[in-house]
Amino acid sequence: MSARPSYAVAALAALALAACGSSSGAGSTSSSPPPAASTPSTPAPTTTGTSTSATGTTAPAAPSTNASTTGAGAAPSICRAADLSLSFLGGQGATGHGELGFSLRNTSGQTCSTVGYPGIQFLDKSGAPLPTTPEHTTHDFFGSVAKQALTVAPGASVSFRLGVTHGMTSTAGCTTAYGLQVIPPNDTATVRTSIPNGAYECRSATVSPLAPGDSAYSS
């Protein structure tokens, strides 16, 4: 009879230990927060399919607006002395005024352009320069000559006229000119021609602008 209480006490002790162990494990589990759920990373958008590189979608460059100077529409070059020949058209006088006409002919194979007044120098019989004072004008004793841009085809001519004091009775120290030296507009080289039988030259002379054909003298 005395042994049963000992077994009962031992059984109660075993139950108490089991209860303690179970309580300790439940507390440990509840105090630790559950691990955070792993959020899958979102990959950066790729540019492979939507590239805006120069080889894909870049707009083409705008065309150049610079004008060409070598195409069919290029302006003719300036008429130079090397491409021109000078000739005397004639002379006439009235009431103490003399008119002398001259022509510049395009002897090259290319069209050229010119505008304005030629430079002039009277020459004596030996070709030496005489005192010359030119006065550029669109209106002289013999009428008007308009200043205009001219295109001179191969073989074509332009003209100008000189107005001089006419007659040996002038007090301006006149002499006889037997030739004329000319510098075409926008050039520095010269061309020459003779004046058959000479012409009175009294230092100063009016000079018309260049005109088409022989019109500066024959108008």
Image (spheres, rainbow, N blue to C red):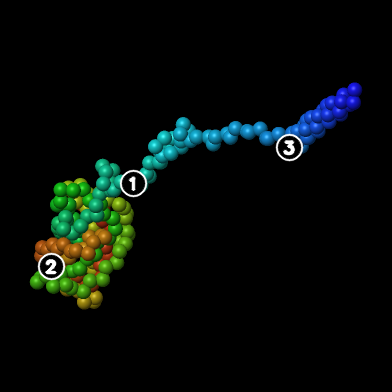
Q: CA distance from mark 1 to mark 2?
A: 48 Å
Label 2 crowd (10 A; few <14 / some 14-19 / many >=20): many
Which label lies toward us, 3 or 1?
3
Give the secondary structure at mark 2.
strand
Closer to the chain start, of discs 3 and 2, is 3
Which residue lies at the image location 37% right of the left edge and 44% below the top edge? 64
Eyeballing the image, is 63 above or below 184?
Answer: above
The amino acid type found where label 2 is placed reads Tyr
Q: Nearer the viewer, residue 64 or 148?
A: 64
Which residue lies at the image location 16% right of the left edge and 58% below the top edge? 82
* Residue located farthest toward the top when viewing the structure as drawn: 1
Which residue lies at the image location 12% right of the left edge and 63% below the top edge? 194
Eyeballing the image, is 60 above or below 183?
Answer: above
| Residue 99 picture location, percent across and down | 22, 61
Closer to the chain start, of discs 3 and 1, is 3
Quadrant of residue 121 within the rendered picture = bottom left
Residue picked out by circle 2: 178
Q: Nearer the viewer, residue 30 or 130?
A: 30
Q: Mark 2 and mark 3 in contact (Cβ < 8 Å)? A: no
The amino acid type found where label 1 is placed reads Ala
Label 3 crowd (10 A; few <14 / some 14-19 / many >=20): few
Residue picked out by circle 3: 32
Which residue lies at the image location 13% right of the left edge and 73% below the top edge? 128
Q: Does residue 104 appear in the picture of this structure?
A: yes
Q: Which mark is residue 67?
A: 1
Quadrant of residue 9 within the rendered picture = top right
In the figure, is residue 209 to the left or right of 81? right
Which label lies toward us, 3 or 2?
3
Give the secondary structure at mark 1.
loop
| Residue 174 picture location, percent across and down | 20, 74
